[in-house]
Amino acid sequence: MLARAGALLDSPDKAAGNSARLAAFLTRQAVEELIDTRCATLCDFPVVVGTTKAKLAVLKSLDTTPAGGTLIDAWHQLTGFCHQHAYQLAPTVEEVREQCTAVQRACLSGASESSGTGCAGGGKADDGHV
C-alpha cells in the first residue's frame, strides 16, 4: 500500500487534486496493518483484537524500538490528514510523502532491530503488499 500511495503522489494528474488525501488514506491503512503485525509480535499471539487506539497503547507500552513511536506518530498524523474539515487546509503532497517515508524507514529499521518482525512482508516496505 505504501508503494501505491507513493505512485499516487508521483502521478502527473494528481488524481484531480485529491492525491494527497487519497495517499494519506492508503498510507494509514498500511500503518494499521503494520501496527497489527507489530502488536501480534509483541504479544506473541497471532492476532491481537481491539481498536486501533488500544493497539497503539500496546505499542507504546511494549515496543522499545524507534519504529513503534514512528508508527504511533504516523497514525495520528495520517488520521488528521484523512479527515476533512472546512476550517482546515488539505494536506500537501509533501506532508503526506514525509509520512510515507517515515513509515518506510520505521518499517525497515524495525525489521533490522527486532529480527525481521518490524514490518509485514519481511521488512519490504515498498513491495506493494504491506
Image (cartoon, helix red, strand yellow):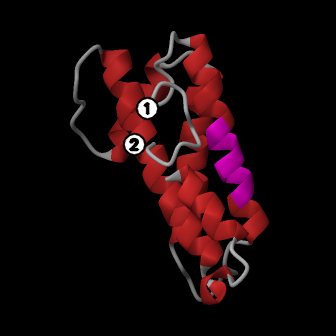
Q: Residue at position x 52%, y 69% from top?
A: 82
Whether 113 is drawn above or below 120: the answer is: above
Comparing 65 with 7, the one in front is: 7
Instruction: Residue at 21% x, 36% y: name it.
Output: 49
Q: Amino acid at mark 1?
A: Ala
Q: How many marks?
A: 2
Is residue 99 part of the magenta span, yes or no?
yes
Label ID, residue 92: none
Q: State the residue in front, 35 or 88.
A: 35
Q: Residue furthest right?
A: 94
Contact (CB < 8 A) between labels 2 and 1? yes
**Residue 61 location in percent, x, y?**
46, 21
In the image, taking residue 110 as reference, residue 94 lies left or right, namely right
Q: Disc 2 on helix, strand or loop? A: helix
Q: Which residues are magenta?
A: 97-104
Disc marking residue 33: 2
Task: Give the foreground label among 2 and 1.
Answer: 1
Which residue is denoted by mark 1 in the rendering? 120
